[in-house]
């Protein structure tokens, strides 16, 4: 390597050599500036506690608070100059505090380290993001419940293997997603409960000899209690992983719904029409209306899953306690938060806006001998056939209808009687799609009356949250 300048070795981007490379790989200010509100809140709580415990003077604490509040205003108003030389949000704020209030700024970091500082900032941030996610999921459920009420009796084909299986209602289909989103909220709320502990005061890793009051700062920052182990406090990123895993599952659900919207809105299906707001035209094919928003929701799920995988992988080899690897947690979480919020807003908007083509759904629901199970059930109920035998007889009826290219309900009674002489006209009452869905009254079944009851259940559940 001798004889080469640093420029030749590392290329133009790092023309000034190792120090520039180190700064570029080490600095996190470009993304962790997003934590400024949490960072300032943490510092205010910490300095107030230090003064209460007689560790710093009340005058210094007051100065620190005044300076920090001014910095928050400067950042809020876009007047703060972030500097890469100060590496991260913690040092950017502290450096500015020193220039605003002088030596008192140096007392803020007593009995604290950036390790517990970043841990508390990030927990506060993720906790807020989790609450926002919970609220956004609620809005999706509200949209689904509204559409379910409107379409409690709108018949559509229910699918398994994407083959028409048995008729269901569109309302029932919407409420299936409400159930998923309801569980998603449960996961987010569980994660919030577990992350609700303050790591502040764990200091670098071992705690501190200063007589601090961690219960006091935990309370001031809105945490239920302080964390119990200082090593764990600075090395734990479970809260971020739990958030990402709940986010990934929620995104997966959104992606499935988005995929259905893509399928339903094809001219071949034509079950739904997307509003112009959530689709785009083609630049070359005038007849097209593309479900871009739904496709992008499907794609966003990939990067949200990726964030979970990235952070799991970042964490898996780290010895206790803090390692700089952990600085890479934030971009993953920020990216997942932003993209999931967007995906949720898009799916909620699409579900609220989409026009349901009830005629198309009904016609498709009747195709493919979708009431064959109803026919078999009738044979069991009315003639006492064992289900397996009824299944066999029904199979022959389907073959007959297929051969004649007619629907099951269009088979003449004489033909059906060839399969079993005891069959009567009454069988036709179960062969229509409406009769089929109306009969599915078992708890959780698709009958319109059940769907209406579930809509009432959801309204009560949401109402009781206030
Ligand atoms: N920017 C760092 C991070 O995000 C803050 C903690 C730095 N701690 C340290 N010991 N270097 O993780």
Image (cartoon, rainbow, N blue to C red):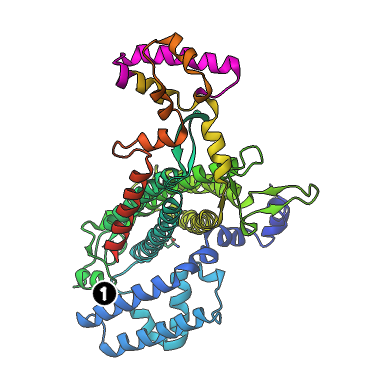
Provide residue 429's location: percent of width, then percent of height.
41, 29
Query: Looking at the rendering, which quadrant does residue 419 occupy?
Result: top left
Provide residue 433's location: percent of width, then percent of height.
46, 34
Out of 190 and 177, give the one closest to the viewer. 177
Relative height, residue 81 to residue 157 (above, below):
below
The boundaries of the magenta stretch are 380-408
Provide residue 347's location: percent of width, then percent of height.
52, 53
Relative height, residue 318 to residue 189 (above, below):
above
Task: Tell me the quarter of the image containing the C terminus.
Answer: bottom left
Q: Secondary structure at mark 1?
A: helix
Relative height, residue 346 to residue 365 (above, below):
below
Q: Residue at x 41, y 63 (%)?
A: 132
Out of 352 and 111, give the one closest to the viewer. 352
Residue for badge 1: 220
**Can residue 390 be seen in this snapshot?**
yes
Q: Quick check: 457 left or right of 87?
A: left
Q: Residue furthest right?
A: 284
Q: Residue furthest bottom?
A: 59
> Is the distance from the Cβ of mark 1 to the nearest ligand 1 atom less than 8 Å?
no
Relative height, residue 377 to residue 198 (above, below):
above
**Can residue 54 be seen in this snapshot?**
no
Count numbered badges in the picture.
1
Q: Residue at x 34, y 38 (%)?
A: 445
Out of 363 and 3, give the one closest to the viewer. 363
Kindly report the secondary structure that dominates the magenta region of the rendered protein.
helix
Q: Residue at x 64, y 50 (%)?
A: 292
Provide residue 373's location: percent of width, then percent of height.
41, 24
Q: Quick check: 213 left or right of 16?
A: left
């Amino acid at each position: 390597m001798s004889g080469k300048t640093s420029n030749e070795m590392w290329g133009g981007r790092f023309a000034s050599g190792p120090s520039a490379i180190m700064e570029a790989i080490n600095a996190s200010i470009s993304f962790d500036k997003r934590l400024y509100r949490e960072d300032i809140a943490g510092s205010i709580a910490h300095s107030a506690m230090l003064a209460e415990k007689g560790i710093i003077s009340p005058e210094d604490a007051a100065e620190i608070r005044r300076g920090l509040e001014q910095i928050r205003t400067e950042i809020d108003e876009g007047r703060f100059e972030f500097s890469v030389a100060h590496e991260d949000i913690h040092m950017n704020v502290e450096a500015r505090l020193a220039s605003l209030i002088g030596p008192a700024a140096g007392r803020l970091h007593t009995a604290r380290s950036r390790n517990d500082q970043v841990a508390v900032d990030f927990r506060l941030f993720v906790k807020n993001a989790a609450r926002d996610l919970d609220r956004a999921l609620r809005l999706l459920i509200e949209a689904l419940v509204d559409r379910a009420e409107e379409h409690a009796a709108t018949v559509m084909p229910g699918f398994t293997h994407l083959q028409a299986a048995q008729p269901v209602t569109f309302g029932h289909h919407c409420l299936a997603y409400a159930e998923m989103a309801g569980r998603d909220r449960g996961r987010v709320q569980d994660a919030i409960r577990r992350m609700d502990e303050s790591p502040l005061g764990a200091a670098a890793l071992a705690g501190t000899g200063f007589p601090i009051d961690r219960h006091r700062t935990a309370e001031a920052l809105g945490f239920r209690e302080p964390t119990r182990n200082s090593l764990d406090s600075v090395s734990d990123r479970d809260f971020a992983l739990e958030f990402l895993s709940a986010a990934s599952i929620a995104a997966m659900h959104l992606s499935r719904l988005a995929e259905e919207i893509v399928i339903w809105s094809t001219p071949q299906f034509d079950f739904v029409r997307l509003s112009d707001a959530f689709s785009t035209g083609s630049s070359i094919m005038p007849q097209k209306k593309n479900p871009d928003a739904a496709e992008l929701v499907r794609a966003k799920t990939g990067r949200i899953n990726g964030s979970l995988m990235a952070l799991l992988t970042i964490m898996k080899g780290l010895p206790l306690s803090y390692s700089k690897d952990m600085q890479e947690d934030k971009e993953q979480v920020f990216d997942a938060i932003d993209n999931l919020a967007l995906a949720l807003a898009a799916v909620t908007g699409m579900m609220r806006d989409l026009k349901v083509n009830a005629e198309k759904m009904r016609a498709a629901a009747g195709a493919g001998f979708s009431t064959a199970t109803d026919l078999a059930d009738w044979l069991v109920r009315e003639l006492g056939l064992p289900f397996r035998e009824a299944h066999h007889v029904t199979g022959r009826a389907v073959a007959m209808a297929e051969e004649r290219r007619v629907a099951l309900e269009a088979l003449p009674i004489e033909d059906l009687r060839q399969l079993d002489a005891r069959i009567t006209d009454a069988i036709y009452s179960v062969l229509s799609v409406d009769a089929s869905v109306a009969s599915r009254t078992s708890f959780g079944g698709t009958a319109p009356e059940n769907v209406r009851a579930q809509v009432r259940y959801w309204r009560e559940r949401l109402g009781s949250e206030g």
